[in-house]
Amino acid sequence: MKKRVYSSILIVLILAILFVLKIAVPSFGAYFFDAFFGIIACIASYEMSKLMSKTKLFNYQILSVIFPAIMLAVNLVCVFYAGNQSDIYWVLWAILIDIGLMLLTVLGAFLIGLLTRRKILNEMATREVKNMSTTKFLFKKCLNTLMIFIYPAFFFLFFIFVNHIGELALAKFEGLTVDISILILLTAILIPMFNDTFAMLTGSVIGGKKLCPRISPGKTISGLVGGILWSVLLMSCVWLIFANITGFTFLWSDFPIWAYLLIVLVGAGVAVCGDLFESIIKRRAGVKDSGRFIPGHGGLLDRIDSYIFIAPYILLAFWIFAL
């Protein structure tokens, strides 16, 4: 328990330092967050690769670890052009480029595998894969690798766009004297944090019927409701604090509290879905944790599972409200 508490404190301190750098050094402070997200994506992809291998879903582990760094670079380049050319569609270009690179990478791995059949046969013998042709094994291996590119890396790296959303040429962001991405990024980080914490506390106090006993035996319906309600309540406090800070008073008209809390409400549900999705993967792998990266918490993937779907959701939600 002590390890869990100490690890949680360390995580909060790291996030606090990153926000201080983002606010104190506007010119390049946001890039510390980008590096942070990129490192997390690489480590989480490694853990995902290990989980899939345990369920006999073999993949290219090295590609799984390296590719998120490539997507990070692509996203940053596109965000840079979006800011300099006042073009919001560079984000869409980044997404399309990421998808194209994912497909080209696995296609390249497949073609190389066809040219090195002896190596594939040796791998199949080592892994005791029988009654399967080398082509089919290679195809499945590439497909599994593509799945890791998408989950967690592709979805999680939407945080890069969230981190720089204030630089995009969205109507309600033009002419602002403050960095709106501070509030939006904080929202994306706090929703799963509040939801997970208060779902656990509410569930342990009230108990009751299990939410999904076959997938996640520890989760209860009371915890689900409690986590969402507390998230909405606490995030309303966050909105009120920002709305009364000089420079953020535009929130009263452009992002009224009802719209903000609607985003939070749906976001809390999205966070729960992300948590349950990873629980399904761990169940199939027959493990409790995705790894041992964070003392007391398990793997890094266990800590960010609620964030993987939150990143694209928050970007889309605020994009719509900012048009």
Image: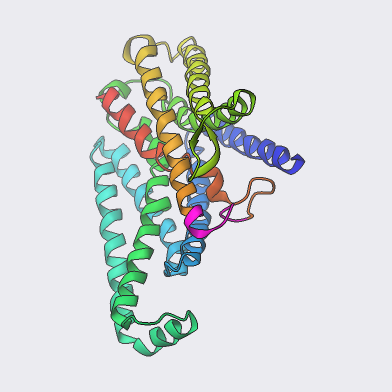
> Is residue 105 or residue 200 the one in the foreground?
200
- Spot occupied by residue 130 in the image (x, y as percentages of width and height): 39, 82
List x then y, in percent, for residue 146.
34, 61
Which residue is situated farthest in the bottom direction here? 118
Residue 171 pos. (x, y %): 25, 23
Classify residue 58 by image quadrant.
bottom left
Image: magenta residue range: 282-291
Q: Quadrant of the C terminus?
A: top left
Which residue occupies 37% across, 32% down? 314
Position of 1 relative to 229 (above/below) = below
**Residue at figure coordinates x 52%, y 58% from the top left:** 47
Q: Which residue is at a point 38% across and 64% down the rendered structure image?
A: 145
Colour setup of the view: rainbow
246 or 184, nearer to the observer: 184
- Rendered view: 116 above or below 151: below
Magenta stretch secondary structure, dominant: loop
Give the vertical position of 210 relative to 115 (above or below).
Answer: above
Q: Residue furthest right?
A: 2
Quadrant (top left/top right/bottom left/bottom right) for the N terminus: top right
Residue 269 in sight: yes
Question: Which residue is more in the foreground, 62 or 81?
Answer: 62
Where residue 303 sits: x, y (%)? Answer: 56, 44
| Residue 290 lies in the magenta-colored region | yes
Looking at the image, which is closer to me, 158 or 140?
Answer: 140
> Residue 303 in magenta?
no
Image point 40% across, 52% down: which residue? 151
